[in-house]
Amino acid sequence: RCGYEEGSDGKMLSVLTDPSVVSWMAMEHGWSVETLLAAVATASPRVNALIDTGALITGLNNLQVAQFLLRIPAFATWCEGVVFLDESDEKMVYVRSTCRVLKLSQSGISPQARFTFFDQVHTTGMDIPQHSSARAIVTLGKDMVWRDYAQGAFRMRGIGRGQTITLLLIPEVQGLMCRQLAKAGTMRRALTKRECDAGPQSTEVAEADRVHLRPGAPAPPIQLDDVAAWLVVNSMKTETTQYDQLCSQNLANVWRRNAFKQLMGGYAHFKVKADDAQHFVLDSLGHAFLSAKLGTCSRQAIEGKTIAIYFGTDGDNDTKFSSLTGVSLTYGLRAAHTHFSDSFEAVFVSASTTAEWFTDEFSEMPWLAVPFSHTARRKLLRETFNIEATDVQALVLVDPEGRTITRDGARLMMLAGAWEAQDKNYESRLKDSKYDTEVRDRERKVLAREERRVRPLEFELAEASAGLRRIGPEAAAEVQAYCSLPTLPEAVQKRLDAASAAYAKSLEGVRGLIQQHLDELAGLKAQSERMRALGDAVCLLFGHRAEWALFVAKALAAGLQTRVARYDRNDVPPGAQRALERYVASAGGAAGAVASSQALQKEGGPAAAALHVWVACLGALMEASEEAARSSGRQGASVVMTRTCQCVCDLLGLEDVEDLDALVFVAATAEKAAAKAAAAGATEAEEDEDEDGAADDAGGDKLEAVQSRLMRMRQFAAILEKDIRTTNLSVGPLLDAAKTAASNINANELGHFEQVLRMPGVVEGDEIARDAFLFMVTAIESMDAGAAKKDDGKAAKEPLAVRAKRVVGFVNERINAQHFAVFTTRVQEATGTEQEATRVRPEDWSKLVQLGTALTHSASTVSRNPNSALATYATVRLLTQWARDLASYLEVHSDLVRKKQQLDAVKAEAAAAQKEIDEDLQSAIAAESSALPADVDPLSLRAVRKRVRRSGFSAPTPAVILALQRTGNREDDAVALLELVPAARVALAALEQPTRLRSVKPSTITPKQLRKVSRALKGPDLRAACDAILAHMNDLDASSHQLQKARDAHAAKLKRARDLAETSARLVRDLQKRAAGGTGADEP
């Protein structure tokens, strides 16, 4: 059982029968979808939604309904968009201003300014917010029930709490409702227009009127209670029909179950005997078979063998795999046929529809097949085993006696094939395992050999690490020289500073130009050779052809000052460099350009002089920069030390850096700035950085906001231009149709006009004629300047026939031919031409469009009535056609004019925003250029600092300036360089304290780093330096050897002298002893 919330049905019934919530609206006989939508659009008070629960809107999709509603002028005056549901159930809105379809969530249209259309499919379960006092129209259909009505009405979620609905009743539904209520004993009649305007009565008032109703009086009109009663009766009828159908099905199931039970019970009696079935299967197989190798075979090929009857499909048999085993049926069948060819045979029963197809699929099969021409045999075999589907493979196994083993042989065969595939896979994996074992043993031997080679290298690495402690002050000085910025000779530095100052001054001259100066230069009629050379140089610098026309059209366009201020001299086109050198040489350098600028100012004004000085100073600065680049270099660091430091940086994670020298310089600058900040106090340094960041953010946010607004305006302008181009394509055909209709109102129609104007009842009584003549009078009087000053109240009091006669020239029951000629001319003027637009006042266009739209609806309604004025009088037809065509043209033309005005306003606003951006840029450049080097763009500095802060790391301003100098003011390259500064500072710390390198583990070094370091160590410059060092060491060894030899010779001489002295001393002592002992003279 379903559980409903208590009181919900009563609440819905109370709300939907309350006259203060629900009102009436009735359509007349002969209504159509267009007239219904027009009535909804022009309803008073205003309607905010149409809920088509009765499915009355047919022949139009939801988008077409939205487009139709917005073409009605009275509706388009307040509605900015119509909300509907598309084919994907997405909430979309058709926007009036752009004629585009957007998602409702992206439109930004308020609920008060939009209209919602719920088609019959989406009247249940779809929520679209409405404003608190919204009003909706709900349609009723002949097959509706109470649930449909309640679901549709409660799309207005605030119904009964400020939101209301209006029931739209068509004559057919009212008649059906009265007939159904009469069968229940309640007499009712259809509503009149006055009763609809008065609204529904309350239940008490309606009941009181029915009590006092006199006998024989007409039946009372339909009330809200009657609508609810009729819908509930429809619900009961629908549920009764469903119940009757369910009972019929249940009753039929009684005899169906009994019949099925009897059929299954008699199966044992009627089934074929086993012996007969065996012979029947063998007979069905036949006696003739085909073989791809042997050709035609007889019955003997299958006698005494187990038979597999293979039923093919009408597709590719080899591509059908089992989701369980992963192999195809043919694979398993081939394996069985190969292994058991003596006791097993397969017979293929094809499902092919052509002989060529049968030949193609059977040509690769090694077993037998029933011939393609034996269609009856193939059909009989399928019927015998109940194989009806031709898109599913089947396999029936039959023993040699013809008994069926199984009809599910396909699954068994695929399992057997999968087993065999796994067996083969196992053998293959076994071979692979043996191979892997051999490879493992071989690699182990290689590993042992490499380990023996590594051990001496580890010892050498340990000795080299211990040697890091013995690095002397000379090597430390070389490392410091490597990390220091290159210095320039004093003369070169002075020339570079002078060129930078001159270039900065030339930029100030260009920034001081105003648009009047640029217009004066662009307006030169005759140009001298110097002026043409200036134009060619500027064009080449900005990437244009060297032509004076391009110089005026593109180089002198708006924003020249900003483009010159942000010009990057590193991006000078190759073709412009030689032209720039020639121009600088002809001008005599920067100093000569300043002297010669006076002559150019007399000829082309301040703009020519400023651009002349800027081009010459730019060339001079480029020459000075090139000379500085040639003169700069590291001093105090040898080639060996430079390459060694680079290799250390590569090993510490900087191997992917393209400009390693620039990174080292920036890191060293950042290190000095950090040390300076630490000495000054971290708090003070952080406050300075915060102030710079706040200033950059404030200026950058303002600039970004203006640029974002400018971008949106340009996008909107592009959309408007596209819409204008599209609208222009439709304006021409509409104007041609209106001119054709106006040309048909000529002098030949004078008699027809007289005939109609003699019958004021036709002019004022017939709806089509009245609207047509009112359109004509309004259009002609709108062109009259005097009529524009007349009192509108007095003109409106005149009968339409009188006004029409005055416009046409109808006097004394006749039309004057001259007056009629003037009238036809004014009709042509009201229509307009390609050269001259319509002379109708723009403020009257909307009124004419509304009249033309009403004429279109009225004409479509009475087009089939042969007695109408439209069918009777040619004048009415001509005026109606002219009014419809001219109204269509004016509607599109007014939209085109409005879009053009809107486009002009957007372009003016965009120009103002661009001017504001240029002024902000110029002020920012002027404020920051004074404190920066000439080759650093202040806007690039601000942008890089902002990106650095947003990336989550900090960089001191000197490091940012140096990064921009090294990268040529390329912001992306500068940011990428600054992101690597932390890693570079680690490398610098290791170079300053080499003992830190002992913590680097060989396992952390990547092969890419090793390859780069190996290439650097094998470079020719490092090899030459090493060779020179080795030669010097060899010379030292030779000198040391010679010195050692001299020392050895001298030591030998000293030893001989020492021995001689000792011998002499010993002899002297002996002589002294003998002399003291008194030896005789005869003694020697």
Image (spheres, rainbow, N blue to C red):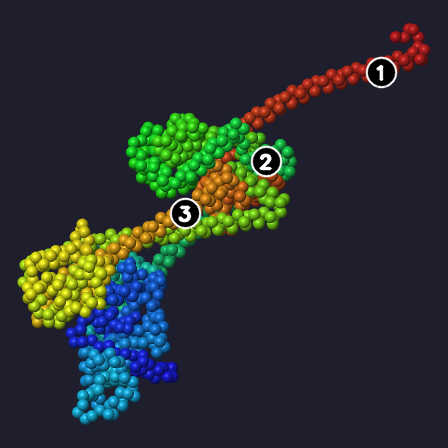
Q: Residue at x 31, y 34 (%)?
A: 524
Identity, as a three-letter code, of the amino acid under mark 2: Gln
Q: From the viewer's perspective, tell me whether residue 628 is left or right of residue 1066.
A: left
Q: Which residue is mark 2?
A: 480
Q: Earlier in the sequence, mark 1 or mark 3?
A: 3
Q: Which mark is residue 420?
A: none
Camera-nearest residue between 345 and 418:
418
The residue under the point 79% across, 15% down is 1060
Q: Residue sitting at 61 percent across and 40 percent down?
A: 993
Please say whether residue 425 is visible from this viewpoint: yes
Classify mark 1: residues with Cα within 10 Å, few (<14), some (14-19) or many (20+): few
Q: Residues within 10 Å of mark 2 (few under 14, many from 20)?
A: some
When the figure is inspected, residue 498 is found, relative to residue 215, above or below; the finding is above
Out of 317 and 930, give the one closest to the viewer. Answer: 930
> Mark 3 sits on what residue?
917
Question: Residue 860 at x, y = what percent?
Answer: 15, 68
Above or below — where is 1079 with respect to 235?
Answer: above
Q: Is residue 174 visible?
A: no
Badge 3 or badge 2: first in the primary sequence: 2
- Find residue 1076 and report its image quarter: top right
- The quadrant of the image that shows the C terminus is top right
Q: Position of residue 19 (x, y in %)?
A: 30, 81
The residue that mark 1 highlights is 1066
User: Which marked residue is nearer to the observer: mark 1 or mark 3?
Assistant: 3
Figure quadrant of residue 737? bottom left
* Label 1 with label 3: CB-CB less than 8 Å: no
Task: For mark 1, give the secondary structure.
Answer: helix
Q: CA distance from mark 3 to mark 2?
A: 46 Å
Foreground of the two, 1020 or 354 = 1020
Secondary element type, mark 3: helix
> Of label 1 and label 2, which has the lower sequence position?
2
